[in-house]
Image: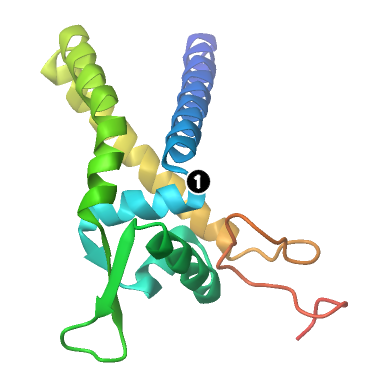
Amino acid sequence: MSSEGEEVGARLGRAVQGYQSAVDDYDRETARLLGVNETDLRCLEILLAVEETVPSALSAQLGLTTGSVTTMLDRLEKAGYLTRSPHPTDRRRTLVRVTPDAAQRTYALIAPFIEDSTRQVMERYTAEQLELVADFLTFSQGIQQQHVQRLRETTAPGPARSGGRQSSGPRRTGAAGSG
């Protein structure tokens, strides 16, 4: 790679890291204002995007054990953020949906950002430039997801941690890590 290419790559890497930090900060503040933790917020984001899903899908997307998902859903249901109901065709399954009030509260927080960023980005870049950015982000998302899966398949060195997001990957059991 040329010196110029290395400089652009380094600048791009710093920009992506800075962007990710800004996203993390925004999510943390949104979670704070909703009175939830960041994993709960991610669950709500998923539900807002799909309207309804089953707990096992949330477990897979969030990298949480089924027990952790149940605890999270109990907490969010108690707070009035979601509802659970029997699946219409499979009595062993449950459907999870965000409540209209939760959707309204969440959108009230994020709509100003969405509207403002859309306006500013559309004013600054051409449609052709935005197509390239969209392609870059979609391509990068695929790479990120591949590496999330790789990390989930990697056993952590030591006992599983408690609290927060939990990996759905291999877990060590027992003092010697066997079992």
Q: How many marks?
A: 1
Q: Nearer the viewer, residue 85 or 16?
A: 85
Q: How is the image coloured?
A: rainbow
Please state if 145 lies on the left or on the right of 132 as rendered: right
Mark 1 lies on residue: 38
Q: Specify the farthest residue to the bottom.
A: 91
Q: Quadrant of residue 135?
A: top left
> Percent position (x, y) of residue 36?
48, 47
From this view, report whether residue 116 is shown above or below residue 90.
above
Give the residue drawn at x 20%, y 22%.
115
**What crowding class fits label 1: few (fewer than 14 Cα within 10 Å), some (14-19), or many (20 or more)?**
some
Q: Position of residue 169 (x, y in %)?
A: 58, 68
Tag 1, which secondary structure? helix
Where in the figure is residue 178, as x and y percent of width and height? Answer: 79, 82
In the figure, 72 relative to 140: above or below? Answer: below
Front residue of this view, candidates 83 and 28: 83
Q: Is residue 139 left or right of residue 13?
A: left
Task: Tell me: 84 left or right of 15.
Answer: left
Tell me the quarter of the picture where residue 131 sits.
top left
Q: Residue furthest right?
A: 176
The residue shown at (82%, 80%) is 174
Residue 104 percent location from the top left of the image: 22, 42
Q: Name the residue type under label 1.
A: Glu
What residue is drawn where x is 47% and y is 44%? 35
Location of the C terminus (image quadrant):
bottom right
The answer to whether residue 179 is seen in the rendering is yes
Which one is in front, 73 or 42? Answer: 73
Residue 1 showing in the rendered view: no
* Residue sitting at x 17%, y 15%: 119
